[in-house]
Amino acid sequence: MERSKMAEAESLETAAEHERILREIESTDTACIGPTLRSVYDGEEHGRFMEKLETRIRNHDREIEKMCNFHYQGFVDSITELLKVRGEAQKLKNQVTDTNRKLQHEGKELVIAMEELKQCRLQQRNISATVDKLMLCLPVLEMYSKLRDQMKTKRHYPALKTLEHLEHTYLPQVSHYRFCKVMVDNIPKLREEIKDVSMSDLKDFLESIRKHSDKIGETAMKQVPGAQDLVDFSPVYRCLHIYSVLGARETFENYYRKQRRKQARLVLQPPSNMHETLDGYRKYFNQIVGFFVVEDHILHTTQGLVNRAYIDELWEMALSKTIAALRTHSSYCSDPNLVLDLKNLIVLFADTLQVYGFPVNQLFDMLLEIRDQYSETLLKKWAGIFRNILDSDNYSPIPVTSEEMYKKVVGQFPFQDTELEKQLFPKKFPFSEFVPKVYNQIKEFIYACLKFSEDLHLSSTEVDDMIRKSTNLLLTRTLSNSLQNVIKRKNIGLTELVQIIINTTHLEKSCKYLEEFITNITNVLPETVHTTKLYGTTTFKDARHAAEEEIYTNLNQKIDQFLQLADYDWMTGDLDNKASDYLVDLIAFLRSTFAVFTHLPGKVAQTACMSACKHLATSLMQLLLEAEVRQLTLGALQQFNLDVRECEQFARSGPVPGFQEDTLQLAFIDLRQEWLRTGRLCIVWHSALLDLFIQWDWSTYLADYGQPNCKYLRVNPVTALALLEKMKDTSRKNNMFAQFRKNERDKQKLIDTVAKQLRGLISSHHS
């Protein structure tokens, strides 16, 4: 129904329009009717219009006919007129035909021109349309060309922006063209190409910073700020922006972090010979610093490419590997100067990274470990220094011939002696060259320890404690061992040992000055709580005691050498009435040796003298009792007695001052004398072992044995029996008994009886 209504409305509208056109035709000049008729033909209802027109013509014909009928006479008249006009019309027709012919002839060229004009107008419209289309396409082509140029010049991020504009702004305007489709299809490839090229640039960047990390780190460790300016970070920024725009930021971040972790592991792998030179350590540190300078810059100039957690993780790994590497390689280092330089390098390394916000406390803790290593290398170095000093020393008092020389020595070693100062030149210090040299080397060691503590951010108390502990190790271990080695040398002489005792005595006195020296450089008073005390006094005492023991041992060895020259004829019956030659030489040696002991502390000299005398007495007793002496005569005992008396005379002469009364003679008491009483050394003179045999006073010995005031208290019945057994078979050969041969059997019986009684004493004593 609605459709029929619409059709009816359209028909009415068309009829009204046709009516208007007919009225316009009827009322318009024929010269101007063309546009009106064109409007009909432009429409779609010209058929209906023709029907309307035919109807209107018929209506007008009827009206004309009516009018003609009404005006018939007029019509006749008109016909008549018309006939007249006919001839004129024929003429006019001929003229029109002729004119038409001429017009056609003349208009033919015009038609051709008009056709050409038409073609030109068509071309013009086509050109105009083409220009319009080209104006739409040209920006697209320009953008595409710009894109290619940007990619060619590696301006990938602008190229990506251009690609975005091309895809979303320009191509939609000309999407119906085939070349546009090619471009659209090529856009994903271009994006991948941009990604690949930018990733290639990133890889080049990563390789570049891997190669130049040491240069970056070197610059940072020299001046700290501005080291990142050595690096062009634009490849990272471009690649990050490109991947962000392309929606692949996470992929890029993961790739970047993975590659940098790999590089970190390579950087943290030290060369196997790093410990050989400082440059090896420096290059290692430079690479690490360079790596983290780059990462720190990336952290602060990009939004999330790396984050603090990632940096902290890398730093923890770097810290653990660096500390492990330093522990390993520093342990190979035996040069304290290299260890000190390494410490300074580690401090610079730590301070540099601390500026960039990395925690470095573990590095400073590790430096305390290296401090122990440094101390060990110092101790080894000073062991060599002390060895050279002790080996090159002449172990003679230092002679000085002028005031200048005297002040020089006193300036090197704290020594004051009023008596020595009063003496005229030339004069001698009591100690040898090694005393001031050792003292100054101890101070140099303290300075070396102090150097390591610099820049470690330690308190004065910690520095003082470190220096004192290291110095104690130097004294108690290094210097002590050096002194002990010298003292234990096979070719050490008594003179050298005496000088060592004197030297260590003066070094012991100098320990208080070393304490003051440390206090002055650390500003920590010795009275401060927990302050470590120096053990130098103990060291020098131990060395002195070792030297004293070595003197005692050396003296005993010399005595043994003389005793090896002893050549007793145990079967002799003659008496020389003088001491044996070997013993005379031995006593002379002892006198000259003890004369050297004048500068020793009195107790040392006395102990050495007493030790030598005791050893001599014991050795003489062993000579008498040794198993190889199977027989001996009374004459041999008398000769032996002369030698013992020579020893006693030496003891009474006071070879070393300071002994009370005849204390030194106590050494020979087992051979000659008896000692004792109630706790105090006093000498009670009695005949002893030799007197017993020479005087043959067995009745007294056997009667008084065991009593407190026994004349032969020190004579051991076992010893007496041993000697008696040696005399059994030689009694008949003794000249002393030659005139009493008739009593020989009685004498032999007496010996047997005494031997039996001695065995009884021994048996009862053991029971």
Image (spheres, rainbow, N blue to C red):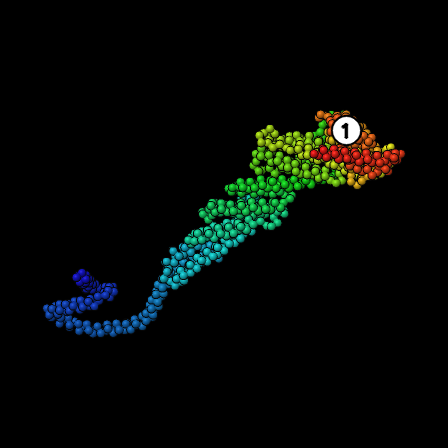
Residue 85 visible in the current orientation: yes
Q: Residue at x 30, y 71 (%)?
A: 103
Residue 664 at what x, y percent from top left?
77, 29
Find the residue positioned furthest to the left. 70
Residue 701: which quarter of the image?
top right
Decide if residue 162 is on the left or right side of residue 19.
right
Residue 192: which quarter of the image?
bottom left
Q: Residue at x 52, y 52 (%)?
A: 262
Residue 399 visible in the current orientation: no
Quadrant into which the N terminus falls: bottom left
Vertical comparison of 257 with 428: above or below:
below
Callout 1 secondary element: helix
Disc 1 target residue: 703
Residue 743 at what x, y percent from top left?
86, 34
Q: Residue at x 58, y 38 (%)?
A: 455
Q: Nearer the viewer, residue 757 or 54?
A: 757
Decide if residue 455 is on the left or right side of residue 173.
right
Amino acid type assigned to the residue bearing label 1 in the image: Ala
Q: Nearer the viewer, residue 439 or 3?
A: 439
10 Å crowding of disc 1: few (<14), some (14-19), many (20+): few
Residue 35 at what x, y percent from top left?
25, 63
Decide if residue 341 is on the left or right side of residue 174.
right
Residue 534: which quarter of the image?
top right
Quadrant into which the C terminus falls: top right
Residue 416 at what x, y percent from top left?
71, 27
Vertical comparison of 343 with 190: above or below:
above
